[in-house]
Image: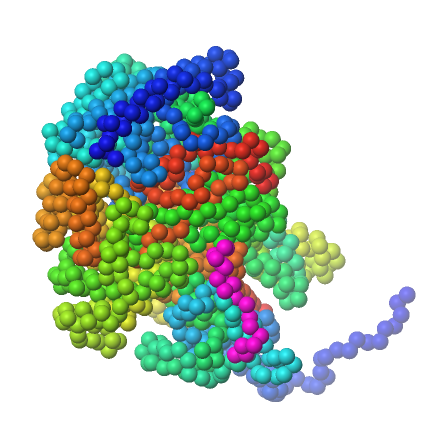
């Protein structure tokens, strides 16, 4: 909890500092040869002077973890799952310093970050404040490398932070107005990395590199200019350059392109366990590329040790059948979306008749009441999901049953009543109601197929809405086409996942509940207006939207926890009452396949991207293999 | 050595030759000589047993598309949420030694929560006789006339899933029957497009020769040297978004037809090149026939039979093309039911491992493709009746 | 002969140009471009996209230029042997295609050989024993491969091979051999994985070949010279092999040129299902993502190979068949 942060951090620093001296390090068996040959320094020098200590039950080092990825681009997943962050979320979604030794903050606008002394990059070079400075001055603010300037998320209403290096282990970021989202940004699944390996990247930077050498490198790589080369080499998120030093627990060793990517342990990783062994336990990760449709088949044949990506709920029965034969077990975690699927009425649609209809809250409520969520739950999810609106889940401290059940009961009579109230009483020969201008009330729901069950769910909803006189027409589209149509106001309704984070607490930013993003399917133009600072899009012209924007702004300026919490509650209440998106079911079970030899993987968990980083919050660096070899692969 | 052998029987008559006498022909011979080209083709085709059987099957299937609604036990979109992934029900005639008539055993349903599996066991106590010529699910005949008459229906409150059900509880047999309508007609429409294009372009190239021919050759070469996949993808992506499924369907048949005419055009062209020099063509030209008349009245009929035969064989490639497009996500989609859509839905490991009856739509595809090929073979063999 | 060759070579140039234009149009036809697809992908994962960054990336990738400029830029590069840079893989096209091409070659050649080995005997037998039950039976077998949709067959075989034979799922070899040097074990692994795609892809080609061989052979067998040869006492086998078979092979030589796109196309879908590291899935992905250089340059290479193939087979045919050499069909 951030309000207690300074105290906690000081305490933590004390503990860590105190313990470090008391630890007797145990050398990693896999690296023993390299140490003996002098290629690597001994463990006491590889680990930071004040390492992060994993307090859970210790395990054994060794082993190779097999995972399956859908394409070479998925190497970025390792950076996400590795979850080596300056600040990190715990499994209960508290925000704590992770790579940082500590953080001081003042008035929520001045943050002083303390690095761990002796923390090194994966190639042995020291990780210091210079890496932060390099990024800020020479990358984020360099005209050629970042023509659009530093990431928008770091700007407080257009104002850049002031970045000062106080000493080689301390950096300070300050704004003139409160910036409560800063630390959370550092803990994102796909983070804003505010540091770079300066010692490596300088060779690609015009300011530091030898002109002739740089020109040769640029020519070699067929790059347009040094900026393009630099950006290609520097892709920590994409994680496709084996030469780029990293702080992640596993380092990429295979140069693309390849069908198999090998990641090996980072010898300079900053975490150790209680008994003095350097993490990660697992020596190597073997990521094989396979077509996403065939991955469930491969997993069912025992070809993965830890897998959840590309596994869907309907694969559970098949995977379960292969358990005994192939040495794994399927666990069912839960997804963390506010709703697995939600309908997004486009309040910015161009058609005036539809616009006024969709903006009328009674219409949205009617649509929501007409849906039989229980049937959807039973037919598609065996009754295991949680029916309700697209709001916070029962696991969140902000959960309110009233919000979840508002307008979510199955009440076709009530829906009909509301529709009659709206004046949509005329019907055509098929029994479908007519719009005021005579057109049949046919809703075209556009879908990009991101969630596999969409088609089935829409079939069920089609029958539900037919009962109350509304025709549904599902239109599958390519994803970018759908986005363009939504932004252009041609789409009247779309279906996609619900809230990304259904387990938020009051410390997290509620911006997504207000029109702040263009990529919100229910109000793209208002979101675009906010994102572009008024240069394009439309200003919100509904009182509800303005109220949400004001609340979001208040949250940024709020000074204490209570204020933030009440703002969140108010925004969630508005969302539920106004049925801004029509949620269906949530907490859909997610299969997670775990090899019988793998330990420390939680039995129950939440599988979510942000926060959660899929397995990140559960710290995969502490997963370990029981010493026998993993189950033999099939011939 | 040279024994006297009996004189060989010979068939030359000793009677004096009368030039004006008419040779009487038997009725059979008369029929043979007076028969038109088409009739002779039909006689020859009749002797090719497999082709006849194939033709009969195809005719039956096409006729069935006229009355799909009546043949299917259920409506096109009827769902049964209580019978999701139900396995096929067997038809029995005897219940414990007693003759009951065609019936099925009802299901007992249990949800296995450990494996998340729906378990259906036939219950011998629930005898559900099949009704014939009955009133069942409502439908709109060809989308126009509401009706409820079915050829077969389940018992009241019973089930009749002869091919099992899918993941929304829809009867597979009904879906296959409705799919026949779309899949078979796609082939027909597509073939008529490519047929027309092939004849016109190939004919012009063959008849005029010279630079018309040269350009056509190049164009054909260009189209043929293209792998089909990118063309399919590009053309399907170019179909306007706002089109209704029916228009998309026509668009797809157009695409399939457009990419298929080259083979036919080449055949037509080479035939034309050859036949152009024949005497009867020269005679027609000398007698003042217009180009059009020469082509359509004289040249074309002499190899029309060959064309029909090759066209018949192209239809299955259209049907298969439709299934391939569905696989790529470019073809038809729910709520339209076609064999391609059904096969695409069967294209995942859950089906192969757990619910294999969903792969049964492969059988009609298989049968139709084979039938068309054998029938086309028979047609081609019959096409040259004088051999 | 020489004049014919020169004429054909000259004609190849406008053909290739036309093909390059078509390829370019095909890739650009779907609305949007690589970046819009990429951005949409990111958004689907909840990453907010800065519209200004979009503009910057567009400039960096050269997608801000008008279409005709992009086209000329690309063709100019091709003429210099530069196949361009793949957006999706962040690598030069040659590197992405490199290894895959070898594997595609192996799979394709094996499929073609399989097709011929199966189709020839069946075709010959069918022609010589027309209308017999064995003729129907064998033709039926030949058609099984054609009539069953490839993608479903591939998946079923994959699953059965794993449950019955323990072969690992998908790919061309076991995972552990992927970067390993060649060894006997690796070779066996490749064979064990190869037979599924070869059977699935190969069988769909056998039907066509059987029918064509049968038809051509039947045509030849009716001719006078065959009857004469038989009447003169030549053994049936020699009668068959020495003359009619050679004549009926004409169309096959003619078709070799167009074999390549067919096999590559036909194998693409199966390769996707079986997750083979060949060019098929790569091409599909590139087309979907509108990765212009990867898809475009690859298609151009294939088109070039095809046009060359057609040219060479026409040359072979002209050398063999004097009727073609002297130009059949007089001008009107």
Q: Position of residue A499 (x, y in %)?
A: 27, 48
| Coloring applied to the structure | rainbow
Quadrant into which the N terminus of chain B falls: bottom right
Query: Considering depth in this image, is C100 or B337 the residue closer to the camera?
Result: B337
Residue C223 as seen in the image, left or right of residue C306: right
Q: Is residue B114 magenta?
A: yes
Instruction: Find the magenta span and give its range.
Output: B110-128
- Picture layout, residue A124 above or below residue A308: above
Q: Residue at x 34, y 19 (%)?
A: A17
Q: Residue at x 18, y 69 (%)?
A: A418
Query: Considering depth in this image, is A474 or C268 the residue closer to the camera?
Result: A474
Q: Is residue C208 visible?
A: no
- Picture layout, residue B327 above or below residue A620: below
Q: Residue furthest top?
A: A38
Count of numbered tags = 0
Quadrant into which the C terminus of chain B falls: bottom right
Query: Considering depth in this image, is B121 or A503 the residue closer to the camera?
Result: A503
Q: Is residue A352 visible?
A: yes
Residue A416 as seen in the image, left or right of residue C21: left
Q: Residue at x 31, y 25 (%)?
A: A12
Q: Is residue A104 magenta?
A: no
Q: Position of residue A342 (x, y in %)?
A: 28, 55
Q: Position of residue B22 (x, y in %)?
A: 59, 87
Q: Residue at x 18, y 23 (%)?
A: A163
Residue A171 as seen in the image, left or right of residue C276: left
Q: Main secondary structure of the magenta part?
A: strand
Q: Position of residue B314 (x, y in %)?
A: 46, 62
């Amino acid at each position: 909890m951030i309000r207690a942060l300074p105290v906690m951090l000081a305490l933590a620093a004390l503990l860590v500092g105190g313990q470090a001296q008391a630890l007797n390090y145990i050398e990693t068996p896999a690296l023993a040869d390299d140490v003996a040959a002098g290629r690597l320094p001994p463990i006491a020098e590889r680990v930071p002077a004040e390492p992060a200590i994993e307090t859970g039950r210790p395990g054994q080092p060794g082993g190779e973890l097999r995972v399956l990825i859908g394409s070479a681009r998925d190497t970025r997943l390792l950076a996400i799952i590795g979850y080596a962050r300056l600040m990190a979320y715990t499994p209960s979604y508290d925000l704590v310093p992770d790579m940082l030794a500590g953080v001081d903050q003042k008035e929520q606008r001045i943050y002083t970050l303390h690095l761990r002394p002796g923390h090194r990059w994966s190639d042995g070079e020291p990780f210091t404040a210079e890496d932060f400075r390099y990024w800020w001055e020479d990358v984020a603010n360099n005209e050629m490398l970042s023509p659009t300037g530093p990431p928008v998320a770091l700007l407080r209403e257009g104002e850049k932070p002031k970045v000062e290096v106080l000493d080689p282990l301390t950096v300070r970021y300050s704004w003139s107005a409160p910036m409560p989202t800063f630390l959370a940004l550092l803990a994102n699944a796909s983070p804003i990395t505010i540091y770079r390996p300066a010692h490596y990247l300088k060779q690609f930077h015009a300011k530091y590199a030898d002109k002739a050498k740089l020109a040769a490198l640029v020519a070699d790589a067929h790059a347009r200019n040094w900026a393009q080369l630099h950006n290609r080499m520097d892709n920590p998120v994409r994680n496709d350059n084996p030469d780029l030093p990293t702080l992640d627990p596993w380092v990429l060793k295979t140069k693309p392109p390849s069908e198999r990517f090998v990641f090996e342990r980072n010898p300079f990783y900053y975490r150790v366990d209680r008994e003095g062994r350097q993490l990660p336990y697992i020596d190597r990760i073997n990521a094989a590329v396979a077509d996403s449709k065939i991955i469930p088949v491969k997993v069912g044949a025992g070809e993965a040790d830890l897998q959840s990506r590309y596994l869907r709920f309907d694969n559970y029965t098949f995977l379960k059948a292969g358990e005994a034969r192939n040495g794994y077990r399927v666990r069912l975690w839960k997804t963390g979306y506010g709703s697995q699927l939600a309908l997004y009425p486009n309040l910015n649609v161009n058609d005036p008749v539809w616009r006024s209809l969709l903006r009328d809250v009674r219409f949205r409520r009617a649509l929501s009441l007409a849906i039989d969520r229980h049937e959807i739950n039973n037919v598609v999810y065996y009754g295991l999901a949680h029916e309700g609106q697209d709001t916070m889940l029962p696991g969140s401290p902000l959960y309110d049953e009233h919000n979840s059940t508002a307008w979510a009961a199955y009440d076709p009579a009530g829906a009909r009543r509301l529709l009659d109230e709206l004046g949509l009483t005329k019907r055509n020969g098929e029994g479908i109601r007519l719009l005021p201008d005579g057109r049949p009330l046919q809703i075209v729901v556009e879908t990009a197929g991101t969630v596999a069950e969409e088609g089935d769910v829409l079939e069920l909803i089609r029958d539900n809405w037919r009962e109350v006189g509304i025709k549904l027409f599902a239109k599958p589209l390519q994803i970018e086409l759908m986005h363009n149509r939504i932004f252009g106001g041609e789409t009247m309704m779309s279906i996609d996942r619900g809230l990304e984070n259904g387990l938020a607490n009051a410390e997290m930013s509620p911006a997504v509940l207000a029109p702040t993003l263009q990529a919100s399917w229910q109000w793209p133009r208002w979101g675009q207006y906010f994102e572009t600072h008024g240069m394009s899009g439309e200003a919100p012209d509904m009182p509800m939207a303005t109220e949400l924007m004001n609340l979001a702004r208040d949250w940024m300026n709020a000074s204490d926890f209570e204020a933030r919490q009440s703002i969140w509650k108010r925004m969630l209440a508005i969302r539920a009452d106004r049925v801004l998106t029509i949620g269906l079911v949530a907490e859909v079970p997610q299969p997670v396949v775990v090899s019988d030899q793998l330990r420390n993987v939680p039995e129950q968990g939440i599988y979510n991207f942000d926060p959660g980083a899929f397995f990140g919050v559960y710290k995969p660096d502490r997963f370990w293999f029981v010493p026998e070899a993993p189950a033999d692969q099939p011939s | 050595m040279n024994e006297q052998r009996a004189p060989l029987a010979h068939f030359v008559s000793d009677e004096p030759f009368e030039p004006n006498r008419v040779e009487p022909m038997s009725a059979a011979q008369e029929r043979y000589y007076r028969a038109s080209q088409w009739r002779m083709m039909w006689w020859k085709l009749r002797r090719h047993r497999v082709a006849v059987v194939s033709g009969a099957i195809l005719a039956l299937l096409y006729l069935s598309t006229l009355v799909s609604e009546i043949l299917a036990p259920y409506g096109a979109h009827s769902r049964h949420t209580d019978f999701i992934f139900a396995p096929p029900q067997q038809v029995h005639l005897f219940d414990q030694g007693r003759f009951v008539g065609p019936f099925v055993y009802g299901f007992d349903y249990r949800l296995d929560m450990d494996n998340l599996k729906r378990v259906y066991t036939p219950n011998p106590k629930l005898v559900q006789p099949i009704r014939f010529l009955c009133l069942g699910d409502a439908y709109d005949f060809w989308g126009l006339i509401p009706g409820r008459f079915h050829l077969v229906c389940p018992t009241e409150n019973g089930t009749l899933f002869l091919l099992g059900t899918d993941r929304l509880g829809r009867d597979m047999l009904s879906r296959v029957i409705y799919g026949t309508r779309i899949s078979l007609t796609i082939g027909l429409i597509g073939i008529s497009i490519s047929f027309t294009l092939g004849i016109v372009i190939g004919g012009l190239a063959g008849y005029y020769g010279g630079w018309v021919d040269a350009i056509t050759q190049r164009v054909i070469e260009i189209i043929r040297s293209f792998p089909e996949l990118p063309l399919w993808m590009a053309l399907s992506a170019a179909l306007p978004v706002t089109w209704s499924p029916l228009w998309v369907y026509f668009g797809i048949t157009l695409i399939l037809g457009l990419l298929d005419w080259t083979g036919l055009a080449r055949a037509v062209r080479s035939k034309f090149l050859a036949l152009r020099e024949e005497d009867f063509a020269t005679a027609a030209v000398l007698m003042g026939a217009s180009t059009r008349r020469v082509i359509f009245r004289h040249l074309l009929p002499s190899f029309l039979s060959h064309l029909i035969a090759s066209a018949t064989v192209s239809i299955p490639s259209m049907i298969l093309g439709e299934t391939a497009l569905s696989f790529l996500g470019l073809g038809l989609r729910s709520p339209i039911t076609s064999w391609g859509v059904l096969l695409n839905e069967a294209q995942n490991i859950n089906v192969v491992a757990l619910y294999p009856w969903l792969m049964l739509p492969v059988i009609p595809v298989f049968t139709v493709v084979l039938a068309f090929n054998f029938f086309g073979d028979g047609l081609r063999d019959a096409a040259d009746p004088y051999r | 002969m020489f004049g014919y060759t020169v004429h054909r070579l000259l004609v190849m140039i406008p053909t290739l140009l036309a093909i390059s234009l078509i390829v370019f149009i095909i890739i650009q036809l779907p609305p949007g471009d690589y970046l819009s697809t990429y951005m949409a992908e990111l958004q689907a994962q909840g990453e907010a996209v800065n519209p200004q960054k979009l503009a910057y990336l567009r400039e960096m990738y050269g997608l801000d230029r008008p279409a005709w400029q992009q086209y000329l830029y690309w063709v100019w590069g091709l003429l210099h042997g530069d196949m361009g840079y793949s957006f999706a893989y962040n690598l030069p096209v040659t590197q992405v295609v490199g290894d895959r091409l070898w594997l595609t070659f192996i799979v394709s050649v094996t499929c073609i050989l399989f097709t011929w080995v199966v189709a020839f005997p069946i075709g010959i037998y069918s022609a010589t024993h027309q209308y017999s039950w064995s003729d129907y039976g064998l033709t039926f077998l030949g058609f099984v491969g054609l009539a069953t949709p490839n993608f479903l067959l591939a998946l079923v075989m994959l699953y059965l091979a794993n449950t019955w034979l323990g072969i690992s799922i998908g790919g061309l070899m076991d995972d552990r051999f992927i970067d390993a040097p060649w060894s006997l074990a690796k070779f066996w692994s490749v064979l064990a994985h190869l037979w599924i795609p070869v059977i699935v892809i190969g069988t769909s080609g056998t039907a066509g070949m059987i029918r064509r061989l049968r038809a051509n052979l039947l045509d030849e067998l009716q001719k006078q010279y065959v009857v004469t040869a038989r009447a003169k006492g030549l053994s049936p086998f020699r009668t068959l092999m020495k003359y009619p078979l050679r004549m009926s092979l004409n169309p096959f030589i003619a078709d070799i040129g167009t074999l390549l796109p067919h096999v590559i196309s036909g194998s693409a879908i199966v390769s996707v299902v079986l997750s083979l590291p060949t060019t098929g899935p790569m091409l599909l992905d590139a087309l979907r993502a509108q990765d212009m250089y990867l898809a475009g340059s690859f298609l151009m290479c294939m088109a070039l190979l095809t046009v060359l193939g057609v040219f060479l087979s026409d040359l072979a045919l002209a050398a063999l068949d004097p009727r073609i050499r002297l130009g059949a069909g007089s001008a009107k």
